[in-house]
Image (cartoon, rainbow, N blue to C red):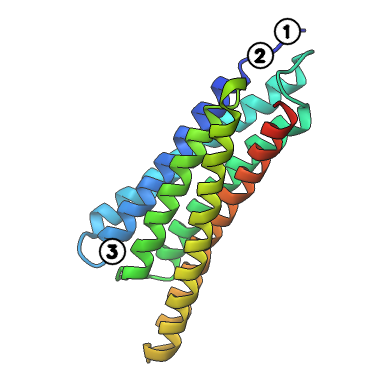
Amino acid sequence: MPREGRFFELFDAHAVQVVEGARALKSLMEALGNDPERVKAMSEAVSVAETRADRITRDTVALLHTTFITPLDRDEIHDLINGMDDILDLIQDAAHAIKLYDVTRGTPEGRQLCDLILACTERVKTAVALIDDAEAMAAMRKTCEEIDALESEADRVMRNAIGRLFRDEQDMRELFRLKSVYELLEGITDRCEDVAKRLESIALENS
């Protein structure tokens, strides 16, 4: 059985797809209400990123079962790749919800949440790239702290957005649609924070 394997390469490749999915979701949200064709194209782009990431996750798990000595604890590898996969799954859920609920207009809060999602995923990508650098554990922890701060900001934006819906939105169906989408969007940042915690644990174990 081989030693080590190309786990770090697979982590990096998956993180790229997470960012691509977040970028497509942001573009989708910005196109709502003014560019239906772009909304459709970006929804498909999210699905493409999710499919590619699923393939990388399967390759990682398969490699885990055929590698004798791994660079990280086996549970750490499994939890990290699946944690990143959870981010993209929820990005896809949000894109599907926008279509399913027939959300036809973007909102400032929705766009702000998508900006925060993209910032979170970019930092996940940055932190993941540092896993194999023993000298970069402090930088990884700092990046994880930034993810935590972004998640807190997303939580604040979501609470304010839902509060405004209940104050100002007269159409109960629209209130339900947007509330559900806001909660999904904020949940994506929660999944990013989960990955950050896993990365911090890896940093502590290997520092």
Label 1 amino acid? Pro
Disc 3 + disc 2, Cβ < 8 Å? no
Residue bearing the label numbered 1: 2
Q: Nearer the viewer, mark 3 or mark 1?
A: 1
**Disc assigned to residue 70:** none
Q: Earlier in the sequence, mark 3 or mark 2?
A: 2
Residue 28 occupies quadrant: bottom left
Residue 96, percent from left and from top = 46, 58
Q: Nearer the viewer, residue 29 or 199?
A: 199
Label 1: which secondary element: loop
How many other residues sit within 10 Å of disc 3, few (<14), some (14-19) or many (≥20)? some
Quadrant position of residue 109: bottom left
Give residue 174's quadrant in the image.
Answer: bottom left
Q: Are marks 1 and 2 in contact (CB under 8 Å)?
A: yes
Does 193 sit above or below residue 157? above
Determine whether the residue tagged by mark 3 lies in a helix, strand or loop: loop
- For the residue pair 189 and 61, the one nearer the viewer reads as 189
Q: At 28% across and 59% down in the image, what residue appears?
A: 30
Across and down, in percent, residue 114 comes to 39, 57
From the viewer's perspective, tell me whether residue 80 is left or right of residue 140. right
Q: Residues within 10 Å of mark 2 (few under 14, many from 20)?
A: some
Q: Which residue is mark 3?
A: 32
Q: Amino acid at mark 2?
A: Gly
Residue 84: x percent and y percent?
A: 58, 41
Mark 2 lies on a secondary structure that is loop
**In the figure, is residue 167 to the left or right of 108?**
right
The residue pinned by badge 2 equals: 5
Amino acid identity at mark 3: Leu
Answer few, some or many: residues within 10 Å of disc 1's Cα (few below 14, many 20 plus, some between 14 and 19): few
